[in-house]
Amino acid sequence: MAPDDRRQSPGGAALAIRLTPRGGAERIDGESKDAAGRSLWAVRVRAVPEDGKANAALIALIAKSVGVSASAVRLVRGAVSRHKDLYIEGKTDEEVRAALLASQRERP
């Protein structure tokens, strides 16, 4: 993510996501840009987008990938949208990006 595409949040990191529920896997597909040029991460989860199940699966996957508890990951925007903004407490943007890239490389 380029510095001009995201906000550094005090005490944590901001993360933009494009979520694919019912994606057949729990994985981070990679970093890309949306139509407006904003950096975001494409993420798939198996969960259905009902009753917050896909959001909970997203939070669990990001927490595990970044190495924080699920309670440190907060959905800031996009509860019923594919495009979501997360806040990850206790990590910098650079730490989060490095962890997500490493998570991609570990995938079979």
Image (spheres, rainbow, N blue to C red):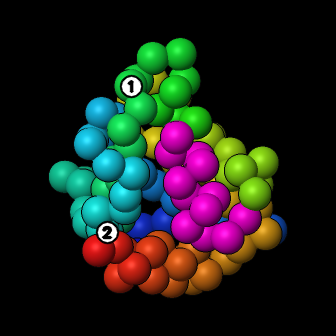
Magenta range: 57-68
Q: Which residue occupies 71% across, 50% down?
A: 70
In the picture shown, does residue 7 fall above or below 98? above
Callout 2: SS: strand
Residue 67 is at least partly visible in this image: yes
In the picture shown, does residue 55 fall above or below 2? above
In the picture shown, does residue 46 fall above or below 59? above
**Which image quarter: residue 62?**
bottom right
55 or 1: nearer the eye?
55
Callout 1: SS: loop
Disc 2 marks a residue whose amino acid type is Glu
Q: Is residue 32 left or right of residue 96?
A: left
**Which image quarter: residue 19?**
top left
62 or 18: nearer the eye?
62
* Residue hosting label 1: 48
65 in the magenta segment: yes
N-term mark: 1 or 2? 2
Q: Which residue occupies 36% across, 38% down?
A: 46
76 in the magenta segment: no
Image disc number at residue 31: 2
Q: Is residue 63 left or right of residue 98?
A: right
Disc 1 marks a residue whose amino acid type is Val
Looking at the picture, how far across and down is residue 71, in whole percent?
A: 78, 48
Q: How busy is the neighbourhood of tag 2: few (under 14 within 10 Å), some, or many (20 plus)?
A: some
Q: Gap in Å between the C-alphas at discs 1 and 2?
A: 23 Å
